[in-house]
Image: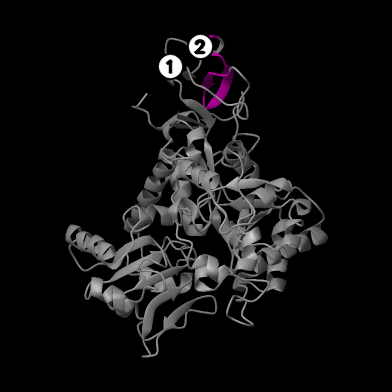
Amino acid sequence: MTADILIVNARTRAVIAAPGTTAVAWRDGIVIALGDDAAVGALAGPATRVIDARGMELMPGFVESHLHLFMGGATLTMLDLGTTFGFDAVAETFARAATDRPGDDLIQAFSVHYTVFGEGTRPDRHILDRISPDRPISLMSADLHCTWANTAALAQAGVLHGADVGPEAEVVMGPDGLATGELREFAAMNRVNMLSRLQGRDGLDYRPAGPVAESDRSYDCEVIRQAAGYCAAHGITSAVNMDGNAYQAGLLRDLALAGDLPVRVSLPLRLVASDGPAGLAMLDDFGSEVPGWLRFDRVKMFLDGVWDTWTALTTSDYPNRPGFRSQPLIPQDTFDAICIAADARGLQIATHAVGDGAVRAAIDGYAAARRANGPRDSRHRIEHIEAITPQDLDRLAPLGITASMQPLHPPGAAGLPLQPTVSIMGRDRWPTAFPWRMLKDRGVPLAFGSDWPVSPIDPLLGIHACLSRQPWADGMPDQRISLDDCLLACTRGGAYADFSAVRRGTLAAGLDADLVLIDGSLDGLAESPDAARVALTVCGGRITYGADSL
């Protein structure tokens, strides 16, 4: 048997492949051989493409365990303010955008920090009006749970005088009886997002009221196609898209069937409290999966919000707010009932839980499902786990729960500001905040992702953040894990969490040819995020990035 493509003259590390592995060969999208150059090179035929890795490091393709593909694609045309701070810098960025994009449409920015205008100065419409008095603008927070808009945007969206956006969201009102410009959680944020070209179709809770125009559908497919290409450029070959609905399922199916998806996608059904267990029937609207490229066998729920809007659910009071612990987005009895019904159907459950109260509620729901249905290899997931009580740390492994974590989320990671988040959390929660090491030491499976566009999608930047993380105060536990453990959490751990480890996540003959070549030094990521880069990505045997560079 001859190979379609060979990679030779590579290097591997012991945690990834057997010693002496320098080459890989694949045919029809399946790895057929791994070994040294001579042994694998013997599979070359007249039509085989041979790629000289020039000593680059060969890895399995990265498994991105938590991202928002459609929304991430939308941000590719927004202003990225992730490293921008200060009024003048923000104003200059918007001024350039207004010149480059003449008209009166909404200009959107994303990855905006709560301290973008300085500590103690929260963005509001008055500040944004100084930047753009007439043209609507909006800034989406780095945690994706808050948007700030100027007066023009609020007026066009019909929320300047307030709006009832349901119990899970808020249009924050000022003492003058008008909106301050801060819109908390998705239902409020989407009022302004409706002014954009996508009109909220990329939103986490989008459910179309009727048919979507074909021109809009084509536009949306292109947004997702570009997002998937962006994944490939960062070495990602599998992605868990965390905002599933029937509309996105249809777009992704069309792309997969047309061969236009350079990344494998798992898409959950998102459920809210009002759906209840009956909402699981909406999975029937997703239609058929595309084997090997698109799967729908899970559900996603939100139990809370985020720290910086005081919507993370806690087990004890917030600092300086006696009696306040926020509210669960789904009541415990409803959450338990959904978990039991989903588990009975053999579905995996992924739950957003940031605060220690939400994490406890998620564990309780998964325990209720096990009591009702009996134990099985469910691998139910908790997304984020930014805080957890010491006693709940020991409940995860016995229930087979997977920790889906994001190395770029901790305050202070890769240059993120510490405030106001660490103060809002409260010092008592710091010892078990973002507890990667504590989870690993307890045998809890780790799967790493980015939560893109909340954080940059680059897995190598995430690994740098994990390796370079520092405790927030003297005497606090060091939650870092080793480079090898980081690499496993980005590959084999992600594949395990996605129930695809039998096909990908490691290097072995007979598995899918999902591979990446890394130029530079992975070991150097502890010191610099620029120590390594993705040079080549292969998904299903097809080169999806870097085809002309080697």
Q: How is the image coloured?
A: one colour
Give above or below for 113 relative to 513: below
Q: Is residue 177 left or right of residue 489?
A: left
Residue toward you, 133 or 43: 133
Work out whether residue 286 or residue 70 is closer to the camera in this orientation and state it: 70
Please name whichever residue, 155 or 393, is drawn nearer the observer in this view of the structure. Answer: 393
Q: Residue at x 59, y 28 (%)?
A: 507
Determine the secondary structure under disc 1: strand
State the image coordinates of residue 463 (x, y, percent, origin top left): 52, 43
Majority secondary structure in the magenta region: strand
Residue 492 picture location, percent across and down: 62, 38
Amino acid of disc 2 = Gly
Locate the N terminus and report the quarter of the image it occupies: top right
Q: Please count the marks in the image.
A: 2
Q: Which residues are magenta?
A: 21-38
First of labels 1, 2 by sequence position = 2
Amino acid type at image mark 1: Val
* Marking on residue 50: 1
Q: Residue at x 19, y 65 (%)?
A: 103
> Residue 114, relative to residue 269: is it above or below?
below
- According to the picture, the residue beneath numbered tag 2 turns out to be 41
Q: Is residue 262 above or below residue 284?
A: above
> Where residue 274 sits in the image (x, y, percent)?
60, 73
> Measured from the top left, where is residue 170 in percent x and y?
47, 78
Per the image, is 34 magenta?
Answer: yes
Cα separation, mark 1 vs mark 2, equals: 9 Å
